Image (cartoon, rainbow, N blue to C red):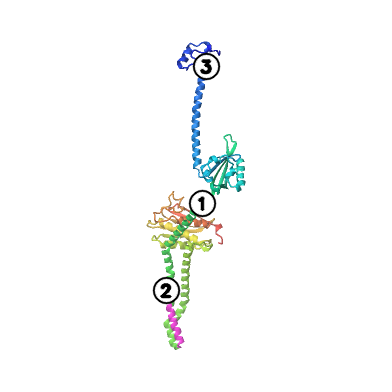
């Protein structure tokens, strides 16, 4: 295309409009075609420039918004933040660090990382830099930070490497939290945990005492028989003592032999002598029974752990069930399904407490039934020893099966239970190395079974 001024179209030198372009197309000369093509390309380039400008402005807006967001996050962080390059020169900090060291970010940036920490921590800072350069993270590394006024604040430092968009290592990002704050938080957490454990122990002990309180009536009934027996025997022994004393006094006074024989028959000294030994033995047996019941109460109410011992499992289970049944207004028909004797080695107090809780639960769920009944059983199988209770109540709901051993979980009405009985029983079973499970019986009602494997039953 010619470059002379004479070859320019007549509409050159002013703003080209649509009418000008149509007019030029109608009256164009052959050498105008190249010029028209240039105009079309210029229009396309201009459109592309406009589109690029729009996209650039949109990206700038997103970038600006991102910068503001990052800035707000950094300024609100309670942990300190330091960004530095590979040489350890500080490039950025946040408000938390600035507040601790008493300097502005502009005064800190450009300074070496070493200047932020105590002189005796130089090796630790160097180690952080070296690990960062090799892409190795640093977690909870304690380093003393120089604070405003010359003091020091130990920091629990975390450090990660920083990479460019091309994956090149460009520096480090260091965050830290004053260890004093962490220690204070841990101290408060430990105190709260300790208080929670103490409260839990108190609640468990209260539940245990409440269960023991429910047994008082049953225990009183258990004590009534031997006490009545001892009282009757002692009354008889007192009467016998008076007769024997009178007879011995007559002997001392050298009473006539004929009168002495008559007195002996009158006082029934022969019968007394025959009855004396059984009376003493019976009294001793009664007092021994009373002593056993009292010792059992003391053991079951004690907070101290006791070592395992040999005992008869059916006897412990029957004692626990009898105490509970006699202490309740509801008087269920109890069926004992167990051998006459089954000697094992373990913690009889734990088993007694578990059976007390299981029997009490069974009685509670059958409170509204006309003819409540329950089965208490124990025995031996191929894996060890088992003991349990089955009630004939409504059974366990599907939603309850997975929660029955959780603390404070109860299906009883408010004021009827604490939800700790089964939880305590479950914990006692685990302490013995056993398992307590609960399920619905195929023929109705719920059944709870304590299983003690052979490996925990030493000394059988």
Range shown magenta: 238-254
Whole-angstrom CA distance, mark 1 to mark 3, is 78 Å
Label 2 residue SS: helix
Residue 285 vs 166, above or below: the answer is below
Label 3 residue SS: helix
Q: Can you identify the residue that label 1 sits on?
A: 184
Indicate which disc, 2 or 3, sits on the residue closer to the N terminus. 3
Q: Can you identify the residue that label 3 sits on?
A: 37
Residue 88 vs 247, above or below: the answer is above
Residue 85 rendering spot, x and y as whole percentages: 59, 39
Residue 304 vs 124, above or below: the answer is below
Whole-angstrom CA distance, mark 2 to mark 3, is 134 Å
Main SS of residues in magenta: helix
Indicate which disc, 1 or 2, sits on the residue closer to the N terminus. 1
Q: Is residue 191 visible?
A: yes
Q: Which mark is residue 260?
A: none
Q: Select label 2 or label 3 by which is in front.
A: 3
Number of other residues with Cα within 10 Å of mark 1, as a class: few under 14, some 14 to 19, many 20 or more: few
Judged left or right of residue 263, residue 341 is right
Rendering quarter of residue 223 = bottom left
Residue 374 rendering spot, x and y as whole percentages: 43, 58
The structure residue drawn at horizontal position 51% and vertical position 21%, both measured from the top left corner, is 44
The structure residue drawn at horizontal position 50% and vertical position 22%, both measured from the top left corner, is 46
Q: Can you identify the residue that label 2 sits on?
A: 232
Residue 86 rendering spot, x and y as whole percentages: 60, 39
- Residue 293 is a magenta residue: no
């Amino acid at each position: 295309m010619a470059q002379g001024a004479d070859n320019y179209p007549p509409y050159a030198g002013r703003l080209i409009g649509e009418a000008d372009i149509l007019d030029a197309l109608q009256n164009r000369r052959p050498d105008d075609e190249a010029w028209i093509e240039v105009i079309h390309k210029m229009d396309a380039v201009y459109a592309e420039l406009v589109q690029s400008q729009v996209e650039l402005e949109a990206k700038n807006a997103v970038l600006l918004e991102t910068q503001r967001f990052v800035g707000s996050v950094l300024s609100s962080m309670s942990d300190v933040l330091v960004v530095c390059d590979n040489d350890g020169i500080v490039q950025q900090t946040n408000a938390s660090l600035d507040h601790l060291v008493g300097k502005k970010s502009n005064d800190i940036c450009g300074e070496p990382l070493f200047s932020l920490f105590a002189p005796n921590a130089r090796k630790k800072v160097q180690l952080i830099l070296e690990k960062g350069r090799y892409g190795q993270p640093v977690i909870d590394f304690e380093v003393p930070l120089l604070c405003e006024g010359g003091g020091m604040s130990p920091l629990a430092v975390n450090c990660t490497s920083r990479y460019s968009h091309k994956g090149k290592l460009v520096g480090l990002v260091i965050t830290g939290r004053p260890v004093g704050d962490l220690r204070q938080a841990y101290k408060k957490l430990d105190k709260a945990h300790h208080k929670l454990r103490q409260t839990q122990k108190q609640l468990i002990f209260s539940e245990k005492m409440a269960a023991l309180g429910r047994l008082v009536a049953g225990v009183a009934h258990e004590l009534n028989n031997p006490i009545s027996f001892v009282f009757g025997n002692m009354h008889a022994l007192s009467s016998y003592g008076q007769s024997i004393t009178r007879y011995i006094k007559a002997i001392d006074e050298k009473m006539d032999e004929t009168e002495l024989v008559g007195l002996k028959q009158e006082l029934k000294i022969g019968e007394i002598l025959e009855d004396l030994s059984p009376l003493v033995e019976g009294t001793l047996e009664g007092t021994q029974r009373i002593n056993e019941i009292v010792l059992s109460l003391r053991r079951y109410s004690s907070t101290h752990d006791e070592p395992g011992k040999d005992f008869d499992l059916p006897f412990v289970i029957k004692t626990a069930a009898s105490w509970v049944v006699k202490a309740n207004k509801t008087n269920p028909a109890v069926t004992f399904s167990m051998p006459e004797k089954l000697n094992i080695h373990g913690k009889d107090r734990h088993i007694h407490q578990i059976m007390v809780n299981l029997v009490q639960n069974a009685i509670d769920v059958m409170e509204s039934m006309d003819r409540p009944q329950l089965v208490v059983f124990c025995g031996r199988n191929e894996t060890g020893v088992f003991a349990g209770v089955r009630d004939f109540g409504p059974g366990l709901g599907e939603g309850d099966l997975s929660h029955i051993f959780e603390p404070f979980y109860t299906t009883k009405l408010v004021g009827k239970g604490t939800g700790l009985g089964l939880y305590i029983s479950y914990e006692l079973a685990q302490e013995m190395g056993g398992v307590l499970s609960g399920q619905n019986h195929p023929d109705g009602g719920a059944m709870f079974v304590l299983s003690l494997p052979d490996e925990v039953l030493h000394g059988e």
